[in-house]
Image: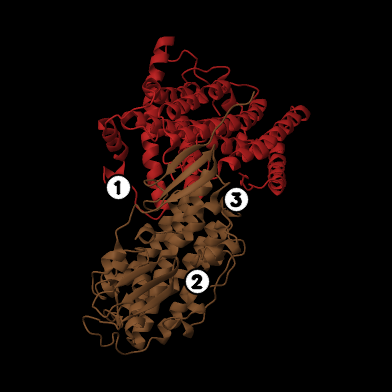
Chain colours: A red, B brown
Amino acid sequence: MTMAALPPDWPGGFWLHWGVFVVVIFVFVMATIMGFIWFERRAMAIMQARLGPNRAGPFGVLQPVADGIKVMLKEDIVPAKGDKVVHWLAPVVAFVPALMIFAVVPFQGGAILADLNIGILYIVAISSVTTVGVFMAGWASNNKYSLLGAMRQVASVVSYEIPVVLSIVGVVLLAGSLSMQQIVMAQDIPFILLQPLGFLLFFIGALAEINRAPFDLMEADSEIVAGFHTEYSGMKFALFYLVEYGEALAISAIVTTLFLGGWRGPLLLPWLWFLIKVILVFFVIVWIRTTVPRIRIDQLMALAWKFLFPLALINLIITAVEILVWPAGSLWVLVPINIAVMIVLVLLWSRFFKLGWGKVEV
Amino acid sequence: MVIKTEPFVVNIGPAHPSTHGVFRMRTTLDGEVIVDMEPVFGYLHRGIEKLAEERTYTGCIPLTDRLDYLASMSNNLAYCLAVEKLAGIPVPERAEYIRVIMAELQRIASHLIAVGSFLNDCGAFMTPILYMIREREKILDLFEMVCGQRLTYNYMRVGGVSQDIPDEFLPALDKFLKEMPGWIDEYDRLLKENEILLARSKGVGILPRELAVNTSASGPVFRASGVKWDIRRADPYSIYDRFEFDIPTGSVGDCYDRYRVRIEEMQQSLRILKQAMEQLPKGEVRSDVPHLIRPPVGEAYGHIEAPKGELGFYLVSDNSIAPYRFHVRAPTLINLTALRDMMVGWKVADLIIIFGSIDICMGEVDR
């Protein structure tokens, strides 16, 4: 397979590269988010035996545009006793990191804003900043539901960061690099086969970090109304909405890059492969959302610390040992071993670990 | 360092996505844990009991539609039974069967909404309730055939029903009875063994047997606590003594049991419907009742096993054309009295599902 990476200064000077990619990424993210919003609503509608948006444009594809116009024309309401500056700042703090993640996501060989040699570490660091924005929103709204939602968000992100990072380390060990480009290059076998357990843990943890069902506790509409953005309206609300989908897009892109072989694939254009894989991952996220109920906050914590965390540690150790004793051999041998290890470990752990009761004596 | 914390009060409701109307819970929370809960009723009070005392006995029937608007047929039936008891009016055989068919269809429709919205409260994003609404629509189609209405039917009359069922009704009902078991199986496949649903609802919000008896709870909530009490068996009204059916009960009295009892009751209702459809006789659907009923001085209590519990109408007559006293024993109001005991110690998320598992209808609670 030809994997000749384009020179880092493509297509010319540094500033040209920079300028082109900032525009490309911004347009790509915005357009894909719009597409995802439409896609999620239509896909969910089909799964739920209803039609979904079908008025604006053919098959309702212009619905996100119509929503966008509506939301921009809406009145911007700030609670009377809220902290106005923080209330204004929060959506921005939450939105910018979601966009910044894409700086290191390779759309195809060389098509990347900055091929940082610490790419995945940068993503881990940047993505947690969104939490600060969410907590600012919850605090500044001066609303009890908002505060509850924000507290849940902080608790879940702090806990789930650890298994997510530990499962990424397995990938990094295999690839021998933190650079997103290098990780894709290393995937002659997609890492989902070499790291099935790591993929599972990463995906569960990532769902919790981006607050998609069944871990969407921070905006659990049946419990705490809309969580941290209860008091938001107009464009500020739209920014939080964009954050939600931007994060889902980012997670889809990261899963694609780390586990599904990034842009690599036969026949089709590389960036097309990338897009197909991203949409596939996003579809799985939507599918999960329509299928399962929500779990409770204590169960969420228990899942992170008693299930994901130990398994992520074991996965890391097994990967390290495998690389140590099998440094030069064909990696295909490891595929069935790792899948078997995953099945055994998950079955074993689910025997000991039950999502327990949560009654407290008061 | 010890961080000082203190409980804070959250008003859940009256306008909240999961309070099934306008119900308010004044909740004291310690973090996520419920320390205390005080229900506040009355936001939907319309004075139906007083309104009814100004109307004729027949004119009260549309008011009963507005009590539990998810089960109007059952309300009609309970009220008509009370008036018939008061005035000693006979009901033709065919009308009795039609009434049973309607009441059991209504039970299925109401339980579909109950289970669907319970799962919505659990956080299953709209999917279960939309599946169940899909089936409920078919029941509503049947009702529309019979009386032209889809929500407030106003179908039953004192001494029978307002009109005979049309010709196309029985084939449509037959088709429904053939399809429905498959749909119930579908719900079971999706939900019965769902790990998250089990974790969320098993052992949550237990209503112990003694407490259930002491609060005079009724309906699926009562039976989930392990008491085999169904007015269709305990005090058979209409023609329920002619049908074969079981009374499903739970063992623990938690949210999961309540959900299971409702699903199993739907299956039993299908059994009753099948028998009623086969035995349906020909004949009149309404006995000769004067336009203005003047029952003799006295009192009567007519009660039925409504989808949500024991629905009773207590009527006092002073030999005029309007009831002197019209009282509704609303099952959900009484089921709600044990709410605090079920909730304390659980978390905010559990509060919502415990409340949802009781299956209330504010129209009936506040009247």
Quadrant location of the N terminus of chain A in the rendered image: top right
Above or below — where is A301 with respect to B20? above
Please name the residue shown 53% across and 68% down the image. B264
Residue A326, relative to residue B129: is it above or below? Answer: above
Mark 3 lies on a secondary structure that is: helix
At which x and y percent is residue A324?
A: 76, 27
Binning the other alpha carbons within 10 Å of mark 2 as few (below 14), some (14 to 19) or many (20 upward) gives some
**Where is residue B112 shown, x and y percent of the image?**
44, 62
Q: Position of residue B155 (x, y in %)?
A: 29, 74
Q: Which residue is mark 3?
A: B199
Of residues B106 and A1, which is closer to you in this image?
B106
Q: In the rendered view, would you say A360 is above or below A93? A: below
Residue type at mark 3: give it. Ala
**Residue position marked by numbered label 1 in the rendering:** A54
| Quarter placement of the C terminus of chain A | top right
Q: Which mark is residue B267?
A: 2
Q: Amino acid at mark 2?
A: Gln
What amino acid type should be assigned to the residue bearing mark 1? Asn
